[in-house]
Each structure stands twice: as C-alpha cells, then as structure tokens.
Image: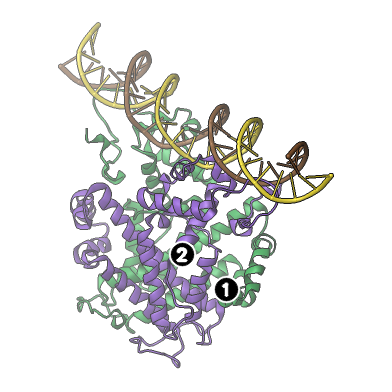
Chain colours: A purple, B green, C brown, D yellow
Amino acid sequence: MSDTSNVSIWMRPEQVQRSGPGRRPGYSRAQITATAIRIADADGLDAATMRRIGQELGTGAMSLYRYVPKRDDLIDLMVDAVAGEIELPDRPSGDWRADLSLVAHQTRTVGLRHPWQVTLARRPTLGPNSLRVYDFALSALDGFGLHIDAMTTLNSMVGNYVDSAVRDEIGWLEQARHTGMDRSQWMAEYVGPYVSQVVASGRYPMFTRNIREGRLSHQQPGERFQYGLDHVLNAIAAALPDPPTPRAADAGHPTTPGAC
Amino acid sequence: MSDTSNVSIWMRPEQVQRSGPGRRPGYSRAQITATAIRIADADGLDAATMRRIGQELGTGAMSLYRYVPKRDDLIDLMVDAVAGEIELPDRPSGDWRADLSLVAHQTRTVGLRHPWQVTLARRPTLGPNSLRVYDFALSALDGFGLHIDAMTTLNSMVGNYVDSAVRDEIGWLEQARHTGMDRSQWMAEYVGPYVSQVVASGRYPMFTRNIREGRLSHQQPGERFQYGLDHVLNAIAAALPDPPTPRAADAGHPTTPGAC
DNA sequence: CTCCAATCGCGTACGGCGTACCCGAAATCG
DNA sequence: CGATTTCGGGTACGCCGTACGCGATTGGAG
C-alpha cells in the first residue's frame, strides 16, 4: 500500500536477493536502465517509451513496472547511471584548478555522449554516482578555509557553466542533424534573414556587435568550452584566499571576493 | 508550401492587417499566448494543451493552428512574452553592478511568477523582449575595453546563476505545493532517512558537511539568492579592469581571459 | 509429493495528447 | 451576385503512460 507513495527512487532500492516463494524476476533495473539509455542515445529521450524499452528487451511495456514505479523514476536512474560514466580519481589531486577542470571536461564528454540528458529540468540527483562527482568537486575546494556554503556556491558556478555550455553545444549538434547545416550555415541561411533584420533595426546594439565582432561562435566547440571554463575558473581563483595556491593561476587580484 | 517549413516562429510573424477577401481572424497570437500563460501559471505547462487553450478561448483546439504552426512555437511565444514582463530602464545606469543586479532580480521575480518557464530546455530565444533584456545586460558591461566575447561570457555567468537559482527555488515551491512540506520538513521527513543513510555511509564527506554545517539551506530564499548573486558579481568584478574607462576603442582581444 | 501463497509476465483497456485532413461558413472583390 | 479566399472547428489517427487483473511460475510447509 505504501507502494504508490511519492518517495524518491533512491529510497526504494531494487530488492535483489529475494528469498521466499514466487517466480524469480527475469529482468533488472540495471538492464532496463541500460536499454533505455541506449534508445535515448540513438533516438532521443522521447523515443525511450515504455513500449519501446519493453520491445527491445523482448517483453511488454507493463512488465517494466515490476522494476520501476514510474517512467520519471526510470529517468532518474538513467541520469545517475550516466553520472557513473564520469571518470575521476578516488580523491582530488590537491590542484583545485586541475581537479575542477577535470570534472568539467568529463561532464562535458559524458554529456555529449548522452545528448538527451541536458533536455531535463533536473531536480538534484541523489543517486550514488551523482553524489560521488559532487563530493569530488567540492573536496577540490576544501582546505582554503572557506565556509562550506561558499564552496558550494563556487562549485555550482562551474556546474552551471558546464550545463549551459553542453546544452548549447548539443543544441547545435541536433540542429545540424535535423537540417544538415552546421553552425555557420545555420546562421547564414536559417536565421540569417531574421538576424539581418534585427541588426538592421538598430535597436539591439550589443546583439549586433556580437554578430559582427564575436569570434567565439566561429571557433571549434572544444575551444569555445575552454574559453568559458577559463573565465569561470579565473573567477573562482579570485575568490580564493591567496596562500595555498598550488599552481600559478594567472591572477586578477581579488578585490572584494567573499571573505565568507 | 513553405508553410510547413522548419523555420523559427520569429521569421513567420503574424500577418496582422490583412486586406483582401476572406473571413477576418477572430483571435490573435497575443491572445492565445496570454491564455496559454495563464493556464500554465495556474496548472503547469503540461496543462496548457491545445484543447484546453481552445476551450478557455471558447473555441476548439484546431482553430489555434491558424495562428501558431506548432505547440513548440507557441511555447517560444510564451517565453518571449514573459521576458516582456522584465522591467528595465531604457539604458544602463553606468553602474554595472547595479544594472546586472537589477536584471538578475527582475528575472527572478518574473521567473517565480511563471514557474513553468524554468522547466524548459530552452534554445536561445530571439524574440524582441528577450533581445531587449540581453542587450541591456550586455551594455552594462560595455566601456571597460573588454572584447565582446568576454562580455558575453561574463554576462552568461549571471544568466546561468539566475536560471539555476530560480529553478532550484521553484523546485522547492512545487515540492511544497505537492506535499505540503516546506524545505526543512521535506529534508527531515522525505529524504531524511535516505540522507541519514548516505551520511552514515561515510562515503561522501563533503555532502555530509553540507548537511551538517551548511546554513544556506536554512535561510530565506531571497537571502540565498542574494548570497549566490554576490559571489557571481564579485567574480565578475575580479575580471574587470580597475577603472571604468570611458567608452573607447577596443584594445583587441587578449587570448588569456584572466588578463582582461 | 502436494498444496498454498507470493510473485512475476504481460494482454487489455482507458483517457489524453498533438495534429493531419477536410469541409462548411464568412468575408471581400470584380 | 458569383468567385475566391480565408477562418472555424469537427473528426480521426497514432501515439503515450499506466491501472487493472489474470494465468504462470516458484519456494516452503505439511
């Protein structure tokens, strides 16, 4: 009866190792999750319907509900499974900049491998893999005497940047897959006339400068990502107290960063 | 024939002021958009179905398709309409910190008024209202001699923060509406047992510190927002050259962002 | 071995969605 | 007054998530 409660999937672990009467389960959460991820990678999250997942497993849609309460819960499982692909050492190296950079690049790599992931309006995932990544990143900022709240805030700046950058990058990739245009083609042919009109209106001078002078959009995705990441890491550097800088992060001098 | 093309809604403006034969339109994009927003505010974006919107307008679902090509396009219109509620002066004041802070707080206010908005995996909106906000924010960072790419990057740090913070805040509000628990209750009763288990496992020391020592989650939402915003603005301050130089020719774009 | 109770596999069915198609109604112009 | 163009919207199709319930399978108790 408490079976239909609105409790997070992490509080209802799969009961493996049953004993007692009853037929043995023929599938598993891990198997279902993996199949769903494979489908979503290939054809998008919307294609990973219960019917389709069941079909690829050689069963029906409803069988899956023996393992997963709702489709949304399955998606939570998918997100955490993907977080499990992020490869990190057991503990941070001591070089916070290298460590956060590693997390950022790993997250980007994995994100690009599973494009559906960024389409989610995600509640914070409390699954084991997500927690591992979170803990690694936060540990990298430990030892500077910052309050835990400040560390969390700084760390989330990196996370927000990566999310946003990867979402952007995937947007272009999907645009390209749909229309066969790459970024510059798209700019020129697809929104080109509209953008020209906006520029010509003279009402949006900064937008116009971005179109005319911006070089960022003409660079390779990897360079673009690195450019923004450097800004964020520099910003964090400015907020850290000077003393135990493990590495010469080129310095803007900290003006009034949190003394928090 | 080009009517079914995959062109952005902004390139297919409503043809108001028709002349010639044929029945006169009985509705308008603005009317449909406003109705959809009202429904989404009250019952969530999923409730704003074509049938429901039609119903509230006293018509059928299919009539809407005379005004809007697809539901997704309608959502684009909704997003830009909401951006129109952001109240800004015509031009920045000259105090970049105050200006960006204003944009951030306005965006938060409007975001909280339309909670469905943050659930969107949004492609950049090119509608007139969104462009206006974008231009205002970017203008606030003008005049420091920064390259437009650097200004864009810094500005998006604020945008990313606001998005993330508002999404978080709304997450809690909806949780509260669904379960009747506020944030601390939810922590205690809903995920409490699970969190305790995670903490007790000893595998996630930073997560544990956050639970034990973190004060941020016990503060009011407004203070929490301000705390994070201050960090972001401090970070930007660190990236700006010290004296606000008057609007002058750009010295060109340094490759090392920290030197900006 | 027999039988019972628990568990799994999954077919059927329901209500809801976006929207393609199509035709009657209305409005203007020659 | 037709002819022509546009709007209104009913009907229908193919999807979706998932509630329900029943037969098949299984381990343990007698």
Crowding around mark 2 (Cα neighbors within 10 Å: few <14, some 14 to 19, many 20+) is many
Q: Is residue B236 visible?
A: no
How much space separates mark 1 and mark 2, taking CA atoms?
A: 16 Å
Q: What residue sits 67% from the left and 64% below the top? A: B192
Question: For the residue marked with disc 1, what is the amino acid?
Answer: Phe
Q: Which one is nearer the viewer's eye here, B211 or B9? A: B211
Q: Which one is nearer the viewer's eye here, B228 or A198? A: B228
Residue B220 falls in image quadrant: bottom right
Mark 2 belongs to chain? A
**Residue ID for mark 1:** B207
Identify the secondary structure beneath mark 2.
Answer: helix
**Could you say where residue B162 lies in the image, as x and y percent from the top left?**
45, 64
Question: For the residue marked with disc 2, what is the amino acid?
Answer: Ala
Identify the secondary structure beneath mark 1.
Answer: helix
Above or below: residue B110 compared with residue B64: below
Question: Is B216 left or right of B142, judged from the image as shown?
Answer: right
Above or below: residue B8 compared with residue A101: above
Question: Is A218 left or right of B47, judged from the image as shown?
Answer: left
Q: Which mark is residue A83?
A: 2
Above or below: residue A12 compared with residue B42: below
Q: What residue sits 35% from the left and 28% below the top? A: B25
Mark 1 belongs to chain? B
**Could you say where residue D26 lies in the image, as x and y percent from the top left?**
65, 46
